[in-house]
Image (cartoon, helix red, strand yellow):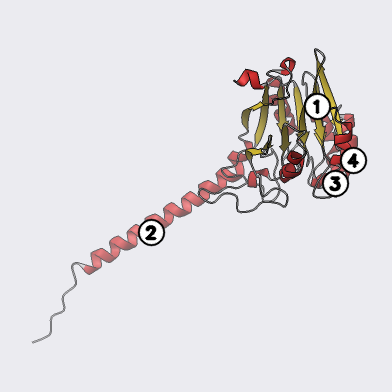
Amino acid sequence: MKPRFTRSRSVQPRFFKTLKRSAVLGVGAIALIFCSLIYAYKIEPNWTQIAYVPIEMPRLAPAFQGYQIAQISDVHADRWMTQDRLQRIVRLINSLQPDAVALTGDFVTRDADVYESSLVAAFKELKPKDLTVAVLGNHDQWTSPEVIRRMLKRSNIVDVSNSVATVQRQGSLLHLAGVDDVWTQHDRLDLVLNQLPAAGAAVLLAHEPDFADTSAATGRFDLQISGHSHGGQVTLPFWGAPQLPPYGKKYPSGYYRVGNMVQYTNRGIGMVSPRVRFNCRPEITVFVLQTSRAKA
């Protein structure tokens, strides 16, 4: 009699079910990764967030109650951040009708002379009620600070690097000060403090946010606004930003209280390589200044 061989009726179907489930999960994972890459490359970099941030300033005069300062940072003009794209952002800022505009550095990544004209064409369209102020960032200093300063002047923007601009209303003062780039050691806070009147609320523009520890220690500034970190450009759930630059690690994104001063770090509107954003939308910040009495 020949031996009889029987096929397993339980192991084989279970194997194919497991294989099918693994294949489905694998295809799903690949699809998720593909969609995430498309989103990070094409969608989120163009999805600008407008963040209104109320700031209580004990030294703010009643004449400046509700004063609005719109901030953008880290333009990084290049083949992606074209003149047309930047002009759309400028028109969006103008639609908000801010009292002042603050630009906190890194106008280019490289080749400042190549992008000077397109930056001027876009920034000349800014129409705040009072003025636009700016400071330089590390990329501006690495590339060509002379070209960037010329671009600011041609755009009717006040360069407050190591300087102070003052707005007056009904005899009261609001100071918009700035320090030049910290990473490249061009900051001179001592010069700023020497120019800063004793009276009036003061806002400090500083490209690198971690400078807040130094500026807050003076006790003279109510608010520091910065950029530099891009918020990490990519932030992962339960992890945060895998990579942050020097001087942008402690206060990488958003609102912080540093002593008696508020530090706010804008996520920027441009990018550096790789040109992707994930869970870190480009940002226009609008600071709404409030007196202590008004907030109470």
Q: CA distance from mark 2 to mark 4?
A: 56 Å
Residue under label 1, please give it. Answer: 175
Question: Disc 2 or 1, which lies upstream in sequence?
Answer: 2
Mark 1: secondary structure: strand
Q: Quadrant of the N terminus?
A: bottom left
Residue at 82%, 14% (x, y): give it: 171
Which amino acid, by three-letter code, is at mark 3? Gln
Which residue is at the front of the view, 16 or 45? 45
Q: CA distance from mark 2 to mark 1?
A: 62 Å
Which residue is at the front of the view, 61 or 281? 61
Q: Are marks 2 and 3 in contact (CB under 8 Å)?
A: no
Residue 141, numbered circle: 3
Residue at 42%, 52% (x, y): give it: 28
| Relative side of 270 to 191, left or right | left
Residue 2 versus residue 62 in the image, above or below: below
Which amino acid, by three-letter code, is at mark 4? Val
